[in-house]
Amino acid sequence: MRVTDRLARGLDAPICLTWELTYGCNLACVHCLSSSGRRDPRELTTQELFAVVDELAEMQVFYVNIGGGEPTLRPDFWDLLDYCVANKVGVKFSTNGSRITPETAARIAATDYVDVQISVDGADAATNDAVRGDGSFATATTAMERLAGAGMRGFKLSVVVTRDNADQLDEFVALASRYGAQLRLTRLRPSGRGADVWDRLHPTAAQQQRLYSWLIDRPDVLTGDSFFHLSALGEPLPGLNLCGAGRVVCLIDPIGDVYACPFVLHEQFKAGSVRDVGGFAAVWRTSELFTSLREPDSPGACASCGSYDACRGGCMAAKFFTGLPLDGPDPECVHGYGEAALLQGSPRPLVSAGHSRPVLVPLTRRR
Amino acid sequence: MTAYSLHPQVGLRDERFGALAYHYGNRRLTFLNDPRLVGVVRTIGEYDDADAALDAAGVPVPARPAYLAALARLQQSEVLVARD
Amino acid sequence: MTAAAPEADLAAAEPAPDDMLAGDVLADVLVEEISIDGMCGVY
C-alpha cells in the first residue's frame, strides 16, 4: 500500500492538528477563516486545554498548529506552549505579531520544538492593510524584526494568496529573506468571512497559472500542499496532493468542538467535541464524520476528466462554501469546470457572522 | 559495519503497518512499513553494529541486505545517526 | 513526492519474506519518506 493510500485511510492518531485557542482577535481581517473577533464565553478553560494536551501526548500527535483568532490574547498561551513542549507535543503557532515583544521573541527563540508563523497578506503596507487593517503590516514586520533579532531563524512568513497580492510573489520572497524567515503561501478559501470576499479576492485563472509555474520553480517555498488543485496544470506540485482533513489532521476549536479542518467550521463538518465522553481520542477514532472521510474518494462528476488523479477534485471547503457538490469540480478547477458549475447558480450555505465584531459604519466618511 | 542510534530529534510512533518517524528538525515524515524494522530501529542504539541489531531482531540472513539498505536510507534522511 | 497513479502492491504490509532479494527496491518498501509540508492540513 502506498503512502498516499495509507494516509487517505486515516491513521489512529493525527500527524498534527490545528488548534484554535480563541475566537478573540485584535484584528478583523476581511477574509478570516474563523470569523474571529469576539471571544466566546464557552472557551476551554486552562485546565481543559491541558487535558487536551495530555490526550494528544498520549496519542503521540507530533505537533499542534496553534491559531485562532489571535492565540496570544489568551493569558495562558505561554504556559500552554511550555506544557505542550514538556509533553513532547511540538508547537507551531500562527500570530499577527501584536504580542511579539523582544521578551517573547527571545522566549520563542530559546524554546526547542516551537515554531512561529507571522501572517501577512501584502508585500507592502497598502496591500496588506487593505485586508488586515491599518497598522497591521507594521505590527507584523516589527514582530519579524524582533524574532530575527532574538536569533530565531527559519520562522515562517505566511501569506494567503489573493487577487491583490498574487503579483507580489517575488516581493514576498524578499520580505521573508530580509528577516531570515521562510515563505509560506496558502490558498484563500471561501470560509468564514472569506465567504463574503471570495468572489472579488480569489485569484483569477491567469494568476493561478502564473502561481503554479512560479511554485514549480521554487520548491523551497512552502505551501502546505494548499494548492494541490493546481497540480492538474502539469507536473504535480511537490507534495502528496491530498486532503488530510479527518484522515491525518483535524481542527479543535476554542470551545472544544472538533471539525474536519479549519476551513469547514460548519455543522456538516463537525465530528464531535473534546468535552464529550471519551474526549478527543474518541472523536478522532470513532466519529461518523471522520469514518466517512476515510472511505475512498469517488470522483463523481470528475470521473471522465483525466486530471482527477492529480487534483483529486480539489478542496471540499472550497466546494462546500460556493454551493458546489462535493463530488464534482473545485470552484477553481484549472480546466474551468468549476466556473461552469458556479454559473448554474447553486445556493451557497448560510454562514453566520461567527465571532466577528459588528462593524460600525460612520454616517459620513472622509477620505 | 556501522553502528547507529536514533536521532534525538525524531519522534517514533507505532502504527498498524509499522511506525511513523517524524523528524522535528527537517520536518520529514518517514514510514517504516515493517514491524520488524521498527523493532530494529528502536533497539539499534544498544548494539555496536547494525548486524548485531538485525541478529537480535531475528531478521533472516537473506533479508539482511534489504534491511541494511533501509537503515542506510534512514541515516541519509537523518532518522538515524551513524556513530563510531 | 509526486501523486502517482497506484502502483503494483509490493506486499509492503507484510514482514519481509525469507527468500527476498537484496537491494534498494526492497528498502523502498520498508521505508518511505515524505516532506511534512506535503499534505493539505499538515504544515
Image (spheres, coloured by chain):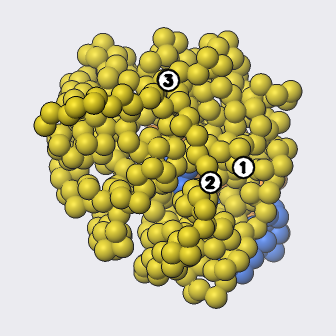
Chain colours: A yellow, B orange, C blue
Q: Determine which residue is flagged by label 3.
A: A38
Left or right side of A332 for A295: right
The kind of residue tagged 2 is Pro
Crowding around mark 2 (Cα neighbors within 10 Å: few <14, some 14 to 19, many 20+) is few
Choose between A363 and A44: the one closer to the eye.
Answer: A363
Image quadrant holding the C terminus of chain A, namely top left
Asked if badge 2 and badge 1 are on a common chain, one would say: yes
Q: Which residue is drawn at 18% across and 53% down?
A: A171
Residue neighbourhood size for the residue with mark 3, other residues' Cα within 10 Å, grouped as few (<14), some (14–19), many (≥20): some
Q: What kind of element bears circle 3? A: loop
* Pointers 3 and 1 within a single chain: yes
Residue appearing at x 56%, y 75% in the figure: A344
Kindly report which numbered mark, 2 or 1, lies closer to the viewer in this rendering.
2
Kindly identify the residue that appears in the image at 37 percent across and 50 percent down.
A160
Residues under labels 2 and 1: Cα distance?
Answer: 10 Å
Residue placed under numbered mark 2 in the picture = A349
Reading the image, the residue beneath label 1 is A268
x and y percent of residue A207 in the render?
Answer: 30, 69
Chain letter belonging to callout 1: A
> Contact, CB < 8 Å: mark 2 with mark 1?
yes
Q: Quadrant of residue A155?
A: top left
**Left or right of residue A348, residue A285 in this image:** right
Q: How far apart are marks 3 and 2 (CA)?
A: 23 Å
Task: Give amino acid for label 3.
Answer: Arg
Q: In which quarter of the image is residue A94?
A: top left
